[in-house]
Amino acid sequence: MSFLRLLFALLLFVCGSAFAGVTAERTRVIVHQGQREVSLVLANQNDYPVMVQAWVDDGSPDGGPDEADAPIIPLPAMFQLAAGQRQSLRLLYVGPAPSNDRESLYWLNLLEIPPDRLAGEVPGSTRLTVTLRTQMKVFYRPAALKTGVDKATAKLAFRLKHGRLSAANTSPFHITLAGLVVSGGEAMNVEGDGLIAPLATTQIASSVPACMRGETQVQFNWIDDEGNLQIGCGRLVEE
């Protein structure tokens, strides 16, 4: 493949990913221990029909449905959606979960495949079709964690060392940060997807504004179970 063709393909992928036509009613799914299944409504916002293939895995960008290994399976695994049509996707828990003392994270993959030919298209005409793949978080929450998720962010501890900012999550829940607010109300992005696993420490910034040094608290935005932004505050220790 020539450089120009490769660049063109990458541009199509990036642009297509930003405008996926098949969307879900929410941005994350919580499966509680004891639930046999959870439903999720999908909608095709394209003006043409698509085939959708669904599977749940560990989130590997190179993984496919044949390599998927998760205690949750989607049904139907493949279906067609007409333009504007909605489809209820069932996520069945088949177990077992790897841990009962903390949340487990999986990813629902939705592969959107457009038709080879659109209605009214002239036979023999040339058209480039692009398949789109989106991923959304699926959390499995053990019964021991029935309560406490709303207080999980209170256990975040921030450490500033050699100009790098990290966040330690001492709770059994996953925490997703959506941004920080430093002195004077200045907004600051976090590195990566902002996801901090249970009982783990993650670097969230490789450099911080000078005004953050000497502070004792960090104000942050985090995403709750409903996908809404919430505000939290954690202590900051400079080493």
Image (cartoon, rainbow, N blue to C red):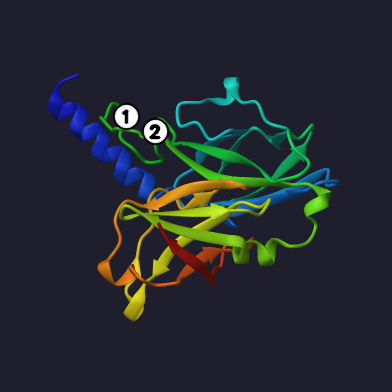
Amino acid at pointer 2: Arg
Residue under the point 36% across and 72% down: 182
In the rendered structure, find residue 123 and report the number of the disc placed on it: 1
* Residue 221, placed above or below residue 99: below
Q: Which residue is mark 2?
A: 117
Q: Position of residue 48 (x, y in %)?
A: 45, 45
- Secondary element under disc 2, as helix, strand or loop, is loop
Instruction: Determine crowd level at label 2: few under 14, some 14-19, many 20+ residues with C-alpha closer than 10 A.
Output: some
**Nearer to us: label 2 or label 1:** 2
Instruction: Determine crowd level at label 1: few under 14, some 14-19, many 20+ residues with C-alpha closer than 10 A.
Output: few
Q: Position of residue 197 (x, y in %)?
A: 58, 46
Residue under the point 38% across and 44% down: 17
Q: The N terminus lies in which quarter of the figure?
A: top left
Taking the image as shown, residue 38 lies to the left or right of residue 208, namely right
Outermost residue to the right: 34
Amino acid at pointer 1: Pro
Q: Is residue 97 in view?
A: yes
